[in-house]
Amino acid sequence: MKPFQIAVTGIGILSALGQNKKETFENMKQNQTGIDNIQSFDASKFISSIGAEIKGYEPTDHFTLEEQASFDRCSQYAILSIQEAVSEARLAQENIGTIGLAFGTCNGGLNSLEQQNGLSNLDSQLTKNYPFFQQGDSVAKHFHFNGPVMTLNTACAASGNAIGFACDMLQHGYADAMIAGGSDSMSSSVYAGFNALKALNDKPCSPYNHRYGLSLGEGAAFLVLEPLEKALERDAKIYSVINGYGLSSDAYHETAPEPEGKGILNAVQMAVAQGGIENERIEYINTHGTGTKANDPAELKGLQSFFGDRFKDINVSSSKAYFGHNLGAAASIEYATTLLALEQGLLPATIHFEKAREGCETAKLVTNEMLTETPDYFLCNNSAFGGHNASILSKNVFHSPQTPIFDSNSETAKQSDVVICGFGTVHALANKSGSILSSFSIQPSPKTKLDFSLKEYNKALYERRMNPLTQFSIGACDLAIKNTLQDKEWSEDIGLVYGTSRGSLKSAEKYLGSILDRGIDNASGVYFPDMVLNSTAGKIAKKFRIKGFSSSHSSGGTDGLHAMLYGALTIKDGKQKTVLVGAGDESSDLSDEIDKALHLTESSYETTEGSTFLTLADEEIAVQQGLDVHAKVKGFGMSFNSEDNLYRTIKNSISRCLDDAKLTVSDVDFIFYHNNNVFDTNEFIKLKSEFGSTPIFTLNNTFGYMESNGSLYHTQAAVELLGLTDEEQQKVTRSLGWTKGPLKKGLIVTTSINGNCMAMAISK
């Protein structure tokens, strides 16, 4: 495959320094800060009462009353910044083709929940805006995007993760253009959580400075991304070329970074390896640099480990002193403003700086005023609660007119198949080994209430106050590992991709309940870390020492297949040889309230909970290591229902999947469909009619509906079925009334409540 070269052709920014990119950057050049007294809520009882809020923002200037009801503040910020980026890039869907969205957020629609001052008898419209996937889906619907739509929830690394995911969609041909970035709005409950952790600064933050502590901010930034050759063909303005990115997990602690910076080191190594660039050509690093006591020296240690003695000659800065810590939008705002600075031959500074604190003295810090420099290549790094890290390697196209844009030597993709080598499910109808095949053909059963204790399953994996979602997911992951290894040696060099639409709402209930019961200034620091949806993935990584490529996401129904896709691409791009992919759901009172708002209570399926994990591997590696190969992953297709024609959207995803897998409809022996049976009932019936003799089947009437995990447990069922002999298959298929066989190739199809559709092809 061609080298990894993705062009940035449009930028949109909304920040505490300005309501567009020009205002933001002009204020940065004047060494201004957007950090000021908090206006949106009473912060007088906290250890700090300052933050970086967007000044003079009035929703009525941009949105009708109806639109304001549909778009949470997080979505509003995203829409405005995307409008700016799309306009600059001259992006028109009729000319470009398939356009997708990668949306990074830490808080999602939390403001819509906070407005209600309670956790019961919730307002339907406000609650509908709360789930994390809703923000990205609402924005995609607003702009009529028709390609891949994914919400990345890796907390403060989310928009860096989103940029990387968007690049993969372009590199592998799943979209012609992608909009990527992040958005987060100021939240009183999040502010209270950082206050409980004593992480706030009562003065405007200055990373690496002797006065430590962070300043929270809000805002949004989005980029238009295209394959470089397409951007050149249409003579688009090019801000930068992304040559590689890396993701990793610290596998260390819920809120503190690994002290030696090994997580960010792994992410940087992965990004630079993908880019095929000599280390000597990297001449600037925009760091995460939160200003907290633990983060700053740890990050610098990780970079020192990568660059060695040369690190002292590389310019380093953190942009958070300009516009605060924007959480899920931090990476995209920092990356976008770095591009604006490089366009003018400048490097962003760390303002408010007085003197370096211990552990930060040896770095070549750019402080208080922007520096005139034109680096060849640069890195933008971000880290997060849950231990997630992201690093983006880019070429500065303004470096020199003599430096060619095409100068990467990387070859990013392997040609061998991605195979499934293990699986495990924790569910009321799964057996102790994690198999669901034994319950596959039973009649619909009310036994979908899960009774699982990780402490009883394996006390060593359990921790006090561990929420049910994390218990289910760690249990399923352990089963998948056991079923994969079968006494073979375990390696920490493995990836992890996890999907959850809602995270642990039981933890959210406890944290928000602590505010409602004791007041916002007495928020629980114990439950606050689990408010970020990537906390489950972080705890899985910690328990199994998974330090490689690591991501967490939300999509409201396609989470499991998205995990399969992202894991498979990670292997194809040579970033990991093996990846664990998983998804999970947890029942709770708050989850029931959300189900009502989303009309999922109207489904004939019982809502249930559980988790599934599968082990993916490069086929050559699997054979070398003597792993069992249960099935092969052949291709994927994605489409978003932006035109209110769900059946056409489903058909588009299936068609794209078949093209990707180089299959025809006649090659398909069966289809498993994870449907919600509220918004897609007619489409399910039409699909069964159109495919005629090809069995189309859902397990949801037996196993219950799991929003995030449903498509993955359908995948496991298909894998188990394909792994049977022809005679064993017949016993199962006869009980289902199927006449077609033997089964060699199948599709898994899934839809979300907002019309996010996906298909995956697998074979024996």
Image (cartoon, rainbow, N blue to C red):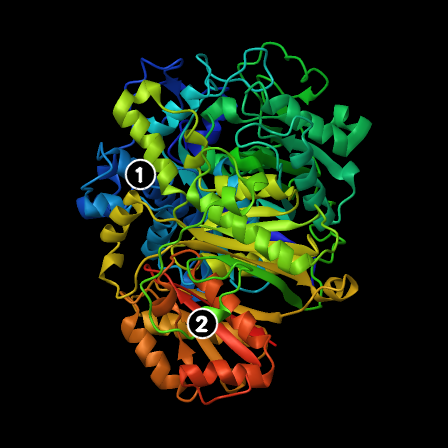
In terms of image quadrants, where is residue 90? bottom left
Which element is circle 1 on? Answer: helix
Q: Position of residue 361 (x, y in %)?
A: 69, 15
453 shown above or below 583: above
How many neighbours does mark 2 have within 10 angstroms: few (below 14), some (14-19), or many (20 or more)?
Answer: some
149 shown above or below 107: below
In terms of image quadrants, where is residue 744? bottom right
Looking at the image, is mark 2 or mark 1 nearer the viewer?
A: 2
Count the marks: 2
Residue position for label 1? 73
- 81, 536: nearer the viewer: 536
Q: Residue at x 26, y 24 (%)?
A: 517
Residue position for label 2? 440
At label 2, which amino acid type do we have?
Phe
Q: Residue at x 49, y 21 (%)?
A: 214
On the rendered image, what quadrant is the C terminus found in?
bottom right
The disc at residue 219 is none
How many neighbours does mark 1 have within 10 angstroms: few (below 14), some (14-19), or many (20 or more)?
Answer: many
239 shown above or below 15: below
575 shown above or below 204: below
Instruction: Spot the residue most to the right.
Output: 309
- 76, 191: nearer the viewer: 191
On the rendered image, what quadrant is the N terminus found in?
bottom right
Instruction: Spot the residue most to the front.
Output: 456
Q: Position of residue 248 (x, y in %)?
A: 63, 42
- 638, 750: nearer the viewer: 750
At label 1, which amino acid type do we have?
Arg
Q: Position of residue 551 (x, y in %)?
A: 55, 47
